[in-house]
Image (cartoon, rainbow, N blue to C red):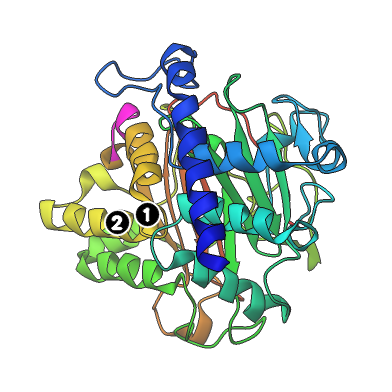
């Protein structure tokens, strides 16, 4: 029976993928500003499982988790723009779906993440909450084959997106958030067993490769974006026009080409140092499937590549006071990748072609 079920599901996905080919060739797609050298109308690997899940929904399920593309949320702006480290995007828990539907949701997860990473994300959920995967919530924005569409999965330490379009003008169609605390809220030096810590290891190799002058430029002594203000958690909603008295962790808004970015300009690094930063980017993208990596790299190229970005390390909140920087950030005109390692790891990601791309966020 299990083999028959898998075969049936496989055929269903293949048929769903095939039936949308004509629509994908004629639809407008998402990346209106995409390069002509990089077609924007191809489907992503997530399109077929999203379509299959959407087709399987009951009327009640549909009303709980399906929204129009610009459905207004609690920020009074489209809900799909929002990102946070801990939230419920709908009332639809993954565990509430039928087993075949849960397998389709697993297919969506696997369509975004590289091999081995769906299992790591599920381990993160168990490590951080003490509960098996299933309490996470899910939503679909838009309608498959009728314009832009994305599926969003949220929960504790998670905002993850899957898109129907392969090359949208906004990577993942919006900002992401990940986290992990396998050794507790206050992680130990070196973050043992943390699934994201290798990204920081690679970033610290760049710092070690810098000469003293460049290290001084890269290291920010004070002003690290954090979630505490005067000792209290700041949970305000950060909207496109919000003015903040100090940098806040979830703020992933873009500053544009004329913006001032913290740290050392990657353009001012040596060839060897730039190559080391490229290895950091590879590590940052490693959790995602090649098609989603290509989204990020496409958007990055449109704004001048890594050389248009800066790399910053934060001296504040250095676990163990060992000079292995737990907190760092790469930022460019329309690129924010913030790795906050104290007291445990949070990763905030927002990448697009256009710096005017809106986003809303808060600390969950």
Q: In this view, does 79 lie above or below 198?
A: above
Q: Are marks 1 and 2 in contact (CB under 8 Å)?
A: yes
Task: Give the extent of the magenta segment.
Answer: 301-305
In-image side of 116 versus 16 (left or right) = left
For the point 44% across and 17% down, which residue is it? 22
Q: Name the residue: 39% across, 26% down.
A: 42
Residue in view at x 49 percent, y 26 percent:
19
311 sits left or right of 339 in the view: left
| Total numbered labels | 2
Q: Residues within 10 Å of mark 2 (few under 14, many from 20)?
A: some
Verify whether residue 187 appears in magenta: no
Residue 360 seen anywhere in this rendered image of the structure: no
- Label of residue 285 in the image: 1
Residue 35 visible (yes or no)? yes
**98 over 29 or under it: above or below:** below
Question: As drawn, is 118 to the left or to the right of 39?
Answer: right
Mark 1 to mark 2: distance in Å? 5 Å
Residue 92 at x, y = what percent?
Answer: 80, 51
Q: What element carries label 1?
A: helix
Q: Nearer the viewer, residue 69 or 299?
A: 69
The quarter of the image holding the C terminus is: bottom right
Res 282 label:
2
Q: Is 351 or 169 nearer to us in this picture?
A: 169
């Amino acid at each position: 029976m299990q083999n028959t079920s898998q075969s049936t599901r496989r055929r269903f996905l293949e048929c769903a993928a095939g039936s949308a080919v004509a629509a994908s060739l004629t639809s407008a797609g998402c990346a209106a500003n995409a390069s002509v050298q990089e077609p924007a109308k191809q489907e992503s690997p997530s399109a077929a499982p999203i379509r299959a899940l959407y087709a399987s929904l009951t009327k009640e399920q549909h009303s709980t988790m399906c929204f129009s593309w610009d459905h207004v949320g609690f920020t009074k702006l489209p809900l799909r723009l929002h990102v946070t480290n801990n939230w419920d995007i709908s009332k639809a828990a993954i565990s509430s779906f039928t087993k075949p539907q849960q397998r389709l949701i697993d297919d969506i997860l696997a369509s975004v993440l590289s091999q081995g990473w769906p299992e790591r994300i599920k381990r993160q959920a168990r490590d951080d909450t003490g509960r098996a995967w299933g309490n996470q919530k899910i939503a679909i924005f838009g309608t498959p084959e009728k314009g832009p569409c994305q599926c969003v999965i949220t929960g504790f330490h998670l905002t993850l997106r899957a898109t129907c379009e392969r090359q949208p003008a906004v990577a993942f169609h919006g900002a992401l958030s990940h986290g992990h605390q396998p050794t507790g809220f206050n992680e130990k030096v070196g973050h043992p067993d943390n699934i994201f810590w290798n990204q920081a290891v690679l970033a610290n190799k760049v710092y070690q490769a810098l000469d003293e002058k460049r290290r001084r430029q890269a290291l920010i002594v004070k002003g690290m974006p954090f979630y505490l203000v005067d000792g209290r958690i700041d949970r305000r909603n950060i909207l496109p026009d919000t003015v903040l008295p100090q940098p806040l962790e979830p703020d992933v808004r873009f500053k544009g080409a004329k913006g001032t970015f913290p740290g050392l300009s990657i353009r001012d690094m040596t060839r060897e140092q730039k190559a080391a930063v490229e290895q950091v980017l590879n590590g940052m993208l490693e959790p995602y499937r090649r098609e989603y990596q290509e989204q990020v790299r496409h958007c990055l190229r449109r704004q001048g590549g890594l050389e248009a970005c800066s790399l910053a390390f934060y001296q504040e909140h250095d676990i163990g006071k060992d000079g292995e920087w737990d907190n760092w950030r790469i930022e460019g005109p329309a690129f924010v990748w913030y790795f906050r390692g104290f007291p445990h790891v949070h990763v905030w990601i927002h990448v697009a072609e256009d710096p005017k791309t809106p986003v809303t966020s808060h600390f969950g």
